[in-house]
Amino acid sequence: MVDLSPTTRVHLLGVGGAGMSAIAVVLHGLGCRVSGSDSVDSPVLHRLREVGVEVFVGHDAAQVSGADLVARSTAVGDDNPEVVAAAQAGIPLYRRAQILTAITALRSTVAVAGTHGKTTTAAMLSHVLLAVGADPSYVVGAVMADGSIGARWSQSPWFVVEADESDGTFGELSVNRAVLTSVEPDHLRRDRPVNELEAEFARFCAGAADGLVVCANDPGAMKASEGCPRVLYGTGPEADYRWRLLRRHRHSIDGEVSFRGDVLGPVTVSMPGDHNALNATGALAMACQLGIDGTDAAAALADFGGVTRRFESRGEAAGVEFIDDYAHLPTEVACSLKTASEGGWDRVVCVFQPHRYTRTSQLWSEFAHSFQAADVVIITDIYSAGEMPIPDVSGELVWRAVAEAHPECDVAYVPRLDDVATRLAEVLRSQDLCLTLGAGDLTKLPDQVISMLAGRR
């Protein structure tokens, strides 16, 4: 068992990441003495300092001295000097998932899982519970739109957690209730084929003994939860909580949600797109299952501020609007581009950065039809996320799949981001949307291009 008593001193490696920074905030809220380190300084480290977490920039063996336990993110390897020092000193070394599992055991935990939408749905549910005075604790794996870390600890019995399936550890969490947004092939390995991933989700659903909320629009989620007592949300007649579209706007969407025919109230989702309307409906459904008044919950969603890198507005220059989105899987890319195409811009100019060599090697052909809603498409090389290259696997595979399936598509392969910025500065024109898609470092691209366009004036 992981000791999280107030006298425990915890040191966190990779504390600047979204997952570990959230853990740091919760542990500090529990009364633990928390420190951490990361390779570079960042606004997240500044936020941690503000809440009272001692943070170090750079990794040094001396920084683990005096720690009762050390935890690391998946990005921190065995050769890290602080990992080595902890092992030599006999200090217990844990994975982030093990710490999170220990935290879930302290509260009645509501876990939000799924291939797509789990971050946004978990953030929306946390926001609704806060807005109606339920005072939840939560851990969301992203920085919120206002720059705050996606975590909070309180005395409420409810703990909302984003359950990440990427390494299979979401099955370790102590879960009372769950929301399942979607199940599609991702994070596959030789020892984790599609049927094993589906089995992991099925076990996750079966473990939510106090209540399970499932997206009826997603075949994978429906299959994984088959046989489990469940409440459904979606747009079809089988949904218990049913979304009906009223109006679309460039940066939001209006609708109403009904529960088994009874309208709960109008809902304004402060993020555009049908997928975000579904996310909001899932959050609303779980809030109601927790006993929150449906009308109050629906009204609370209007003030949700959003999550970074989820159709996030990044600014404007020379009449061009820039939006950045985390979409990196074929379905996610198609959804983001569909949403963009409904925004009323003259053209949608899309830059896509494939994420991980392993994912690209498995899914490159499935991107063939993902970019149909874009007017101009630029594919970059792969963001490795720490993986070693795989021979003959590059962003060119994605480019070729799109170009061969849609020869009419204006699609180019531009491997380097600096060259992409130059290309964008040449092709973008007033009333365009520049949409950057991917989970890697292309998130810096909008600022770079905005600076280049502004400098022309």
Image (cartoon, rainbow, N blue to C red):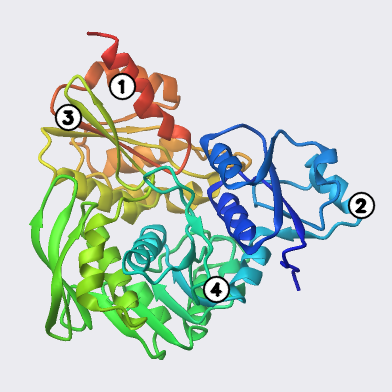
Q: Three-letter amino acid code at disc 1?
A: Ile
Query: Pointer 3: what residue?
Result: 432
Q: Three-letter amino acid code at disc 4?
A: Glu
Label 4 vs label 3, nearer the camera: 3
Query: Pointer 2: what residue?
Result: 89
Question: Are the residues at dot 4 and dot 3 in contact (C-beta closer than 8 Å)?
Answer: no
Label 1 vs label 3, nearer the camera: 1
**Lateral position of residue 276 relative to residue 81, left or right:** left
Question: Are the residues at dot 1 and dot 2 in contact (C-beta closer than 8 Å)?
Answer: no
Q: Position of residue 297 (x, y in %)?
A: 26, 71
- First in residue order: circle 4 vs circle 2: 2
- First in residue order: circle 4 vs circle 3: 4
Q: CA distance from mark 3 to mark 2?
A: 57 Å
Query: Pointer 1: what residue?
Result: 450
Is residue 17 visible to the viewer in this orientation of the structure?
yes
Q: Secondary structure at mark 2?
A: helix
Query: Pointer 4: what residue?
Result: 196
**Residue at 62% over, 53% down:** 24
| Image: 416 above or below 237 | above
- Give the number of callouts: 4
Q: Secondary structure at mark 4?
A: helix
**Lateral position of residue 27 relative to residue 240, left or right:** right
**Lateral position of residue 405 relative to residue 41, left or right:** left
- Name of the residue lying farthest toward the left: 246
Q: Indicate which disc residue 251 carries.
A: none
